[in-house]
Image (tube, coloured by chain):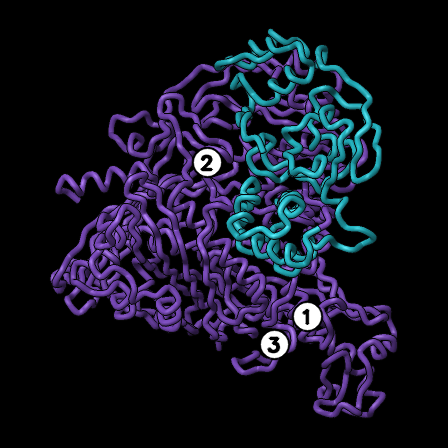
């Protein structure tokens, strides 16, 4: 998982992930990225109304096996669309900049940071969120193991941890402890319940992973 | 209720209330009847057994609604504009462009003439989407007139420093003294002096701070990330009354709800500095307004653990007896007043009749401090427990033996009240065995090779025994189900689960029969989740509440069997005459006979005993590996042994200790808020450059609890566990690094550059 675009500034620190994404999303606005420190005022002068150059489009996202039609701005991140448009709030936004992993979902079976994924880039791909794991109220082996081995504390990073574990076990059904650590290393747990997370993943693997 | 009230008024007493190191006299109401204390040998069905969390399904399937997950019809999104300057006068704020943007519903500029740290709030916007709110926030133009700032504590203390506030950069130091340190030092065979320092630490919970506020006609509703729904409610009422003197704002129409909570570690205590501005936006727009901080704001303006500089002088006899300890310390709470308690290890941890502490605080242009998991203690125990190691070295004694030698069975360094229990001696034995203490280098630095291993240890102490004040309502419904309600909250530690365990045990039911309802300020008086106090405050009251509810149910059964209600017990789903299974009926049958649709038991907790002191104890051992070529330190293994009284849920307790120890690893080695002196800005306000522990860095951790049920502290014999695991490890790591390399590192975090510098200095002949 990429850990590039880590700068997210509040008011006016110039280059920010958001302005970067605006550029990427529209494909032509690379001049909107103003390197170096500028004031909010100058930023605003340059871009009178960002909404003027942000396009909107109706797209179809395949989420948890269902096709969902949504109208999104070109700059909208997948995490924002999942949460704010589709009300799938199990996916958390811990940093918005690809540092913490709380927003991890599966895209075509691979764990991905949904805060670094544009919604438009997820079109035509299979997205699975935490809400899509349990079938008929039956927890997945990973969820069940997190339950039994107390693989969490506050639970905020947990959807991301579980999705990362699902992705890991899909690729490597019998990971060693070292492989589990590496596989889970893109996901921070600030309560630091790591040992409980590792044993949950190991036990899920024993029970057939996914 | 009227009767009960009169009765309760007759039983009010004054008691000392301790919270986060602050003591004040409060009046409390005694429980109507106090449950029999559960002793060491009590056979229990549910308490003390591992139980998975009662809210597990919600958390693990993504259904759990944390504050930011709450969606209300017609809600708006808010962003805050924050100062980019460390100290400046605000000469103009132009919101014209922001206000004109389509979708922007309100822009509000705070009446503020000056900002005093990077991240200080200047203005707020509310808009239809998150992105529009962000755009509008960025379009606000601020003209600053920059003032000199100071963000470095040493620089702030210089006599020619810019004074950043009225009254100056320094607060008057507080001194306390016991015995005579001069006399104590004169009795010492060896005197050791050393200076230690610790960094500014950020809480960085993964759930950033935030709230959704809906100012309706009859209620101001807050969904809020708070560690105290009721203390937040009270603070919000105070603040909104100040801002809106003409409005009806009172405890009965401000409601704070925290259903799920994504970590706080102290930063979410109280109400934060943005409570009022979101309410204002809601009032202006007549809509619910959601305001969730981003990681940048979280790093700048939601609190921090103060730094510390600690100068110690300790006197010790050749046999290990401590004769005197002197501490001169200071730290900074940023722009806010006050500092953490740095005196506990000096004054409390070991038997020592002579101590003197002087602690001052320094103001700088940085965000406010907030209590941070065990406020003051990780700083102070880092310094003091390294000092103990150095003292042991000075007299050629095993550091573990030095600690045993000075074991205190009374508070105030052996001069105060006896502890209700102190399991340190058992902790030492278990920990030393688990880590293999006898394997450590007898001569520090004697491990050969590029990667050197070493072992260290450190003690810890914390209060956290809870206090009186919580009232638990236990409702038994006609269908035999039970609600347990209280205005506390679960901050991720498993409070709900242990409350269900205690209620189930007392009622003779199963956990699945109990529904614990917390996290709403309208519920009965609760405890704010701070200081490791929640568990030991609410659980004893849950017992009393359950008993009170049973006492209302028993007469129904008693009349059926013509027995005295006092003869009845409720076990294994049956209400029966004690030890007579055949005289009784199922709990559900009894409930069905109730004349009304439920009975309510009200449970309080007895105050802590006055004739004793109560504290939690523990010891952390660890083994580290120091790469002498790269300077990288890896904590290989830790043994954490705790005396926290009776453990209600070994599963979640284990998790709690693991988390505390892991967090202490980054405190010892990597995590530090770094500020740039020139710009006055934080250089690492994110989770990439502010280095918290990751999956790759965690040690193997052995967790143990000594099997001591506290005999006096409360009716469950339990003590707190939230902060204790955070306290000792940094010192244990530093001591282990010394054992590995023979070089002392007295400043955390002990980053690779410091290691390499220290090793190089020793090669050149210094130390």
Report x, y in % for residue B458. 34, 59
Which image quadrant for residue B536?
A: bottom right
Instruction: State the SS at label 3.
Output: loop
Q: Is residue B429 above or below residue B729?
A: below
Q: Would you place residue B408 above or below residue B241 in this image?
A: below
Q: Earlier in the sequence, mark 3 or mark 1?
A: 3
Q: Which residue is mark 1?
A: B503
* Chain B tint in image: purple
Q: What hue represents chain A?
A: cyan
Query: What whole-number distance in Å separates the C-alpha atoms at marks 3 and 2?
Result: 48 Å
Q: Give the chain letter at badge 1.
A: B
Q: How many residues crowd around disc 1 within 10 Å: few (fewer than 14), some, or many (20 or more)?
A: many
Q: Is residue B142 left or right of residue B305?
A: right
Q: Secondary structure at mark 1?
A: helix
Spatial distance from mark 3 to mark 1, Cα to Cα? Answer: 15 Å
Element type where label 2 sits in the image: loop
Q: Is residue B553 above or below residue A111?
A: below
Front disc: 3 or 1: 1
Residue hosting label 3: B34
Residue at horizontal 13 percent and vertical 60 percent from the top? B190
Mark 3 vs mark 2: which is more N-terminal? 3
Q: Please provide percent x and percent y for residue B615.
A: 43, 66
Locate residue B520 relative to residue B448 in the image: left or right: right
State the quadrant of the N terminus of chain A: top right
Report which residue position mark 2 lands on: B690
Give the percent coordinates (x, y) of residue B524: 68, 59
């Amino acid at each position: 998982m990429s850990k590039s675009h880590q700068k997210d500034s509040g008011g006016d620190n110039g280059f920010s992930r958001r302005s970067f994404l605006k550029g990427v999303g529209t494909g032509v606005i690379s001049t909107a990225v103003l390197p170096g420190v500028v004031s909010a005022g100058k930023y605003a002068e340059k871009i009178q109304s960002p909404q003027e150059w942000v396009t909107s489009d109706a797209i179809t996202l395949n989420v948890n096996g269902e096709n969902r039609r949504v109208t999104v701005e070109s700059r909208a991140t997948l995490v924002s669309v999942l949460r704010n448009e589709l009300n799938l709030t199990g996916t958390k936004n811990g940093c918005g900049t690809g540092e913490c992993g709380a927003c991890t979902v599966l895209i075509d079976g691979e764990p991905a940071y949904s805060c670094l994924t544009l919604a438009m880039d997820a079109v035509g791909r299979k997205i699975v969120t935490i809400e899509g794991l349990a079938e008929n109220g039956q927890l997945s082996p990973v969820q069940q193991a997190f339950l039994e081995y107390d693989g969490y504390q506050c639970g905020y990073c947990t959807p991301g941890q579980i999705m990362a574990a699902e992705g890991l076990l899909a690729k490597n059904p019998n990971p060693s402890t070292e492989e589990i650590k590496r596989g889970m290393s893109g996901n921070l747990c600030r309560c630091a319940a790591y040992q409980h997370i590792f044993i949950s993943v190991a036990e899920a693997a024993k029970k057939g992973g996914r | 209720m009227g009767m009960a009230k009169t009765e309760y008024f007759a039983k009010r007493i004054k008691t000392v209330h301790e919270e986060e190191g602050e003591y004040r006299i409060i009046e409390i109401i005694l429980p109507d009847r106090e449950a029999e204390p559960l002793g060491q040998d009590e056979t229990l069905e549910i308490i003390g057994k591992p139980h998975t969390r009662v809210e597990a399904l919600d958390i693990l399937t993504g259904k759990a609604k944390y504050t930011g997950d709450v969606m209300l019809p017609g809600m708006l999104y808010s962003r805050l504009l924050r100062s980019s300057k460390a100290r400046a006068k605000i000469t103009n704020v132009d919101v014209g462009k922001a206000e004109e943007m389509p979708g922007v519903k309100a822009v509000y500029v705070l009446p503020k003439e000056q900002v005093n740290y990077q991240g200080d709030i200047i203005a707020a916007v509310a808009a239809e989407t998150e992105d529009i709110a962000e755009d509008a926030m960025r379009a606000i133009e601020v003209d600053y007139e920059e003032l000199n700032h100071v963000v470095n504590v040493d620089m702030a203390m210089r006599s020619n420093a810019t004074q950043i506030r009225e009254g100056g950069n320094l607060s008057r130091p507080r001194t306390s003294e016991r015995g005579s340190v001069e006399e104590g030092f004169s009795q010492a065979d060896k005197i050791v002096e050393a200076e230690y320092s610790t960094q500014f630490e950020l809480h960085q919970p993964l759930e950033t701070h935030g709230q959704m506020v809906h100012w309706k006609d009859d209620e101001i509703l807050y969904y809020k990330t708070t560690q105290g729904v009721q203390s937040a409610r009270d603070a919000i009422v105070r603040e909104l009354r100040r801002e809106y003197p003409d409005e009806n704002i009172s405890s009965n129409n401000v409601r704070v709800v925290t259903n799920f909570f994504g970590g706080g570690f102290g930063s979410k205590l109280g109400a934060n500095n943005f409570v009022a501005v979101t309410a204002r936006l809601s009032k202006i727009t007549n809509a619910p307004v959601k305001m969730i901080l981003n990681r940048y704001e979280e790093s700048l303006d939601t609190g921090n653990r103060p730094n510390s500089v600690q100068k110690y002088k300790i006197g010790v006899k050749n046999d290990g007896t401590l004769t005197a300890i002197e501490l001169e310390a200071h730290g900074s709470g940023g722009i806010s007043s006050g500092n953490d308690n740095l005196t506990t290890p000096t004054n409390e941890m070991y038997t020592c009749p002579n101590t003197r502490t002087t602690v001052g605080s320094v103001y700088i242009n940085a965000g406010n401090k907030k209590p941070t998991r065990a406020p003051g203690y990780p700083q102070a125990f880092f310094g003091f427990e390294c000092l103990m190691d150095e003292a042991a070295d000075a007299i050629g004694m095993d550091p573990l033996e030095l600690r045993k030698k000075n074991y205190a069975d009374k508070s105030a360094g052996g001069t105060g009240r006896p502890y209700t229990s102190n399991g340190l001696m058992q902790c030492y034995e278990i920990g030393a065995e688990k880590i293999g203490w006898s394997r450590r280098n007898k001569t520090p630095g004697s491990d050969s090779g590029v990667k050197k291993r070493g072992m260290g240890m450190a003690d810890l102490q914390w209060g956290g025994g809870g206090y009186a004040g919580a009232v638990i309502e236990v409702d038994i419904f006609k269908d035999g189900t039970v609600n347990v309600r209280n205005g506390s909250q679960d901050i991720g530690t498993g409070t709900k689960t242990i409350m269900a365990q205690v209620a189930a045990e007392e009622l003779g039911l199963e956990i699945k029969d109990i529904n614990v309802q917390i996290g709403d300020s309208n519920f009965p008086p609760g405890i704010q989740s701070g200081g490791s106090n929640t568990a030991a405050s609410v659980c004893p009251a849950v017992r009393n509440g359950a008993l009170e509810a049973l006492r209302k149910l028993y007469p129904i059964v008693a009349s059926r069997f013509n027995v005295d209600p006092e003869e009845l017990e409720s076990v294994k789903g049956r209400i029966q005459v004690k030890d007579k299974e055949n005289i009784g009926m199922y709990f559900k049958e009894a409930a069905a006979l109730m004349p009304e649709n439920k009975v309510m038991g009200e449970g309080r907790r007895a105050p802590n005993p006055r004739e004793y002191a109560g504290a939690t104890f523990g010891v952390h051992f660890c083994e580290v590996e120091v790469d002498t070529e790269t300077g990288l330190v890896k904590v290989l293994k830790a043994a954490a042994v705790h005396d926290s009284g009776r453990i209600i849920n070994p599963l979640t307790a284990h998790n709690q200790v693991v988390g505390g120890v892991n967090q202490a690893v980054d405190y010892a080695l990597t995590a530090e808020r770094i500020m740039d002196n020139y710009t006055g800005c934080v250089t690492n306000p994110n989770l990439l450059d502010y280095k918290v522990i990751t999956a790759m860095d965690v040690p193997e951790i052995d967790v143990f609890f000594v099997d001591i049920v506290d005999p006096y502290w409360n009716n469950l014999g339990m003590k707190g566990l939230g902060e204790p695991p955070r306290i000792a490890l940094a010192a244990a790591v530093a001591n282990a690094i010394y054992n590995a390399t023979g070089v002392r590192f007295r400043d955390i975090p002990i980053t690779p550059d410091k290691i390499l510098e220290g090793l190089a200095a020793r090669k050149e002949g210094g130390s």
